[in-house]
Amino acid sequence: MTAAALKRQRQQPRLRTFHATMLVTRVEQWWVEAESAEEAQELFASGQGHHAAVGERVHVELGTMSDDAA
């Protein structure tokens, strides 16, 4: 190895790999047909309804993180 290559190798920080468990929350659009807002709430709560579109991520929370070297 040349002197220049050894110098570059010493200057670069040693990168490590970290793994994380993330909780990602997003808002989605759903719809139901109902005669009143109360009926619509009951339908949504019972899992009925139609999925309109996948929403954007609105919140990310770091759960755990680990170091490969550990």
Image: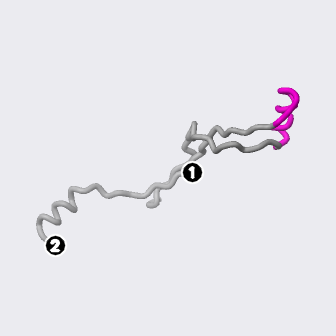
Magenta stretch, residue numbers: 33-47
Percent position (x, y) of residue 27? 64, 38
Main SS, magenta residues: helix
| Mark 2: amino acid | Met
Left or right: 36 as drawn, with respect to 29: right
Pick whichever, 16 or 52, lies toward us: 52
Residue at (72% x, 44% y) in the render? 51
Q: Name the residue under label 1.
A: 21
**Alpha carbons under labels 2 and 1: distance apart:** 40 Å
- Tell whether position 8 is magenta: no
- Residue that badge 2 annotates: 1
> In the picture shown, does residue 41 fall above or below 55?
above
Give coordinates of residue 14: x percent, y percent. Answer: 31, 58
Q: In which quarter of the image is residue 41?
A: top right
Name of the residue lying farthest toward the left:
3
Image color mode: one colour
Quarter that holds the N terminus: bottom left
